[in-house]
Image (cartoon, helix red, strand yellow):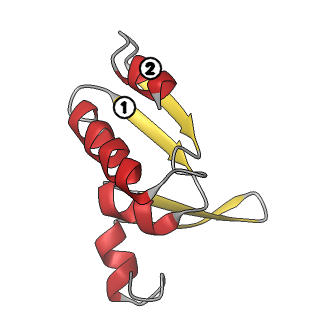
Amino acid sequence: MIELLLILNSSAQYILIDEPFNGVEPLYKEEIKNNIQKHSQYKGIIITDHDYLSIVAIATKVMLLQDGSIKETKTGDELIKVNYLGGA
């Protein structure tokens, strides 16, 4: 978590974060989400993760990949409305 906060507070304009929620306790997941949302106002943040429920809660766009290709690009709300994510 410390590494993530250091990266978010860096001067980088774009950040790629790989599985920030992997193995993290629920209390810290919320803190990570809040920090990502706060910093996304000032820089581009790309997140790759299997924890799609955490991603749709904070993403402006969600790209679903299948066999190395983009299958869908929508907002999290759109994916939930069509029940693509099982009603997150």
Instruction: Where is residue 24? Give x, y as percent.
Output: 52, 50
User: How crowded is the residue under tag 2: few (<14 C-alpha within 10 Å), some, or many (20+)?
Assistant: some
The C terminus sits in image quarter: bottom left
Instruction: Where is residue 49? Give x, y as percent.
Output: 58, 54
Question: Residue at left 53%, top 32%?
Answer: 16
Question: Residue at left 36%, top 81%?
Answer: 80
Q: How many marks?
A: 2
Name the image quarter holding residue 37.
Answer: top left
Question: Residue at left 50%, top 23%?
Answer: 3
Question: Residue at left 23%, top 26%?
Answer: 42
Q: Earlier in the sequence, mark 1 or mark 2?
A: 2
Q: Which residue is mark 1?
A: 44
Q: Which residue is mark 2?
A: 7
How far apart in space, not on screen, are marks 1 and 2 (Cα)?
Answer: 12 Å
Q: Amino acid at mark 2?
A: Ile
Taking depth in this image into account, of 74 and 58 the one nearest to the observer is 58
In the rendered image of this protein, does residue 76 appear above or below residue 23? below
Name the image quarter holding residue 77.
Answer: bottom left
